[in-house]
Image (cartoon, coloured by chain):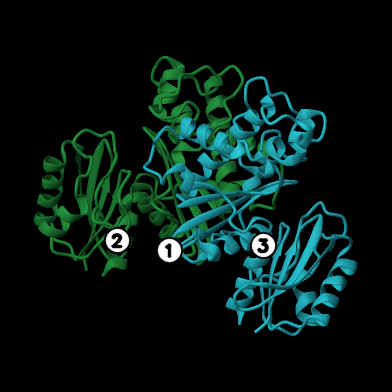
Chain colours: A cyan, B green
Amino acid sequence: MKLGAIEAGGTKFVCAVGDEQFNVIERTAFPTKTPAETLAETVAFFKEHPVDAIGIGSFGPIDINPDSATYGYVTKTPKPGWQNADFLGYIQRELDVPTAWTTDVNEAAYGEAVAGATQGDDTSIYVTIGTGIGAGVVSHGGFYAGRTHTELGHLVMNRLPGDDLVSVCPFHDNCAEGLASGPAVNKRAGKPAVELAEDDPIWQTEANYIAQICVDLTVAFAPDKIILNGGVMHQQQLMPMVRDDFQTMFNNYQDLPAMTDYIVPAQLKDNSGIVGGFALAKDAL
Amino acid sequence: MKLGAIEAGGTKFVCAVGDEQFNVIERTAFPTKTPAETLAETVAFFKEHPVDAIGIGSFGPIDINPDSATYGYVTKTPKPGWQNADFLGYIQRELDVPTAWTTDVNEAAYGEAVAGATQGDDTSIYVTIGTGIGAGVVSHGGFYAGRTHTELGHLVMNRLPGDDLVSVCPFHDNCAEGLASGPAVNKRAGKPAVELAEDDPIWQTEANYIAQICVDLTVAFAPDKIILNGGVMHQQQLMPMVRDDFQTMFNNYQDLPAMTDYIVPAQLKDNSGIVGGFALAKDAL
């Protein structure tokens, strides 16, 4: 059995072929251009490396309602050319194999879940903090969704006193993505954040906002685990700072697992999405 | 068929008997004293008015995990005497009928759902803003729960510039309950909030915080409807102000139903919980 995975980001696409144990056999990555170019490139990869099923995790917003006429489409994205692009339909027409379709963060959340973050009925939340902020919720064996998928990058933040950053989110003055995504940190620093010292006060601000996200996720979804990943989390100093700020803010309101088991890095690092795609493909068979 | 409902609040208990169409036949209410006194009073009511099943919605936190040794208990509440009270067990031992057990806000959310707020697979969220703030999420025919039930009264608020209220939440400096519950409004007013003029600026502050709650609920749960109820919402001027602030903050980030269909008052007013209890009792049969 060969499994396919597509991790479709707004910046790059990753396509991979794996075996039943989710080992990567083939892998490619290319920049996200127009749907015509990028989906053709995706299909070409899987025509060269045939698979029995494909799991797709896409940047969004996307239509996840199987009863909708636009199921499988990317919908209202600001990404040029992708508004109302029939992503899933194109893949299904060109590659006649079973498919699974969800958000990029759900796919990664599922990858972490099958890698052991979640047991049985547990709830785990995968948060990516990078170019954007997003989160996927795996609970009781499925993804949480309501009318549509979650948009947890836009939770309202409590703006810290003295933080006068103009939000980088084009919609919201005080959302998580606007104040705490990678571009927000760069803007606050006035230079690429990777050039900041590890003990720069900007990381204190960043840790505080990430901790606020974790508090909101805790009271909203009552997860067993929150997994933090994405480019910003490559800053190793952040994880203990986030845990400390979370404990201060949450103030032992509920009994939680030990912090080192509760707010954790991704086990699969940059492979969470691909492994999740393989697992979704396997489920689709 | 006679259905029983218990709406167990931290201040008062309401017990009722209804018919299969959820019409109230008998009803009583009494103050919440010790578990021994109050649960005995509850049982006495149902011994006098026998029912075929009972739906229970309780103030919390409560244990909702059927595999837990303390399933059916009230757990870490500050309410004197109720820590680790075996609420459900006592009812089951004294009244030998099928029972259903959930939070007070879930029970009310279910009442609104069966009254038509939710259709089929829809997601609706019932928020009570009164002595405390809490919310129940009905989604795809069930209640959302993770490791435990939601605690949405403790979402992080963006404290408004100039709002120097010391939070009334004993745990959190900037949570919804701490800044926007009834006691918070009273404290901000320096007198009972019912004595404030309808156009007092304090209601602007209140509407803003409630709108923040609605934004967080929207991005977290993608509901089809948010129902606002509770003592504070008796202030009729608040609903349009909340909708306006929500629209300003959310800034058309997603296509949503019309505001008057999206953020709405409870259809059943003070009966949401009792009707939800009847419906849960019917399901338990």
Percent of width and height locating residue A2: 68, 81
The amino acid on which the numbered mark 3 sits, given as a three-letter code, is Gly
Residue B97 - label: none
Quarter residue A36 falls in: bottom right
Res A157 seen here: no
- Disc 1 target residue: A121
Percent of width and height locating residue A137: 55, 56
- Disc 3 target residue: A273
Q: Quadrant of the N terminus of chain A?
A: bottom right
Tell me if B18 is positioned left or right of A14 in this view: left
Tell me: residue B80, above or below residue A87: above
Give the mark nearest the N terminus, 1 or 3: 1
Label 2: state its secondary structure: loop
Name the front one of labels 1 and 3: 3
Percent of width and height locating residue A30: 85, 63
- Disc 2 target residue: B66
Q: In whole angstroms, how far apart are the C-alphas of marks 1 and 3?
A: 21 Å
Label 1: state its secondary structure: loop
The amino acid on which the numbered mark 2 sits, given as a three-letter code, is Pro
* Chain at tag 2: B
The amino acid on which the numbered mark 1 sits, given as a three-letter code, is Asp
* Chain at tag 3: A
Quarter residue B101 falls in: bottom left
Q: How crowded is mark 3: few (under 14 residues within 10 Å), some or many (20 or more)?
A: many
